[in-house]
Image (cartoon, rainbow, N blue to C red):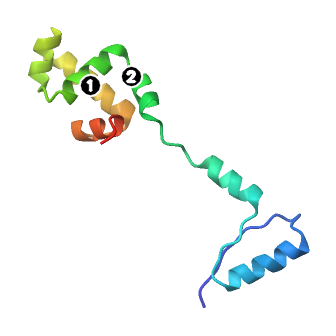
Amino acid sequence: MRRRHGYLLKSAEPEQIVRSIHEIHGGGSPMSLHIARMVVNSVPRKKSNSALLESLTKREREVLDQLAGGYRYKEIADRMELKIDTVRSYIRDIYTKLQVQSRTDALNKVFER
């Protein structure tokens, strides 16, 4: 027999308990509205594109714009008059803040595609 799960508060009305038993029997997973709200509120929300961009410094956004333009690290360094190691450092910080591993992931996360 397959296990079924649901969650009700101790204060549930008898009618709600009966409805929940029928719902479980039908394959559902009953949950009180209070518990459902708690579950929804506990799920981390995805940051919006603007919030992601705001988490970056002005210089990191400039480097990200260069990445979006398709420029390589050396080209970004030359265009922004930076050392290539400085560009690498900015990009590492950008990836950390955006929680990504690559240029493509960073651009897809920040810019709707």
Q: Quadrant of residue 11?
A: bottom right
**What element does badge 1 sit on?**
helix
Any mark on residue 64, and which?
A: 1
Q: Amino acid at mark 1?
A: Leu
Quick one: quadrant of the C terminus?
Answer: top left
User: Seen from this angle, which residue lies furthest bottom?
Assistant: 1
Q: Classify the position of the N terminus by image quarter.
A: bottom right
Horizontal placement of 30 versus 68: left or right? right
SS at mark 2?
A: loop
Query: How far separated are the C-alphas under marks 2 and 1?
Result: 9 Å
Q: Position of residue 65 (x, y in %)?
A: 25, 23
Give residue 47's position: percent from left, percent from top.
48, 37
Q: Is residue 56 above or below residue 41?
A: above
Residue located at (14% from left, 16% from top) = 77
Residue in the picture at 83% in, 80% down: 18
Residue at image location 23% in from the left, 40% down from the top: 104
* Rendered image quadrant of residue 19: bottom right
Asked if residue 17 lies left or right of residue 61, the reply is right
Q: Amino acid at mark 2?
A: Leu
Discs 2, 1 touching: Cβ within 8 Å: yes
Mark 1, other Cα within 10 Å: few <14 / some 14–19 / many ≥20 = many
Report the front residue among 23 and 102: 23
Res 112 quadrant in image: top left
Residue marked by disc 2: 56
Q: In the rendered structure, which disc, 2 or 1, sits on the residue that comes first in sequence?
A: 2
Q: Residue 45: image x %, image y %?
A: 53, 43
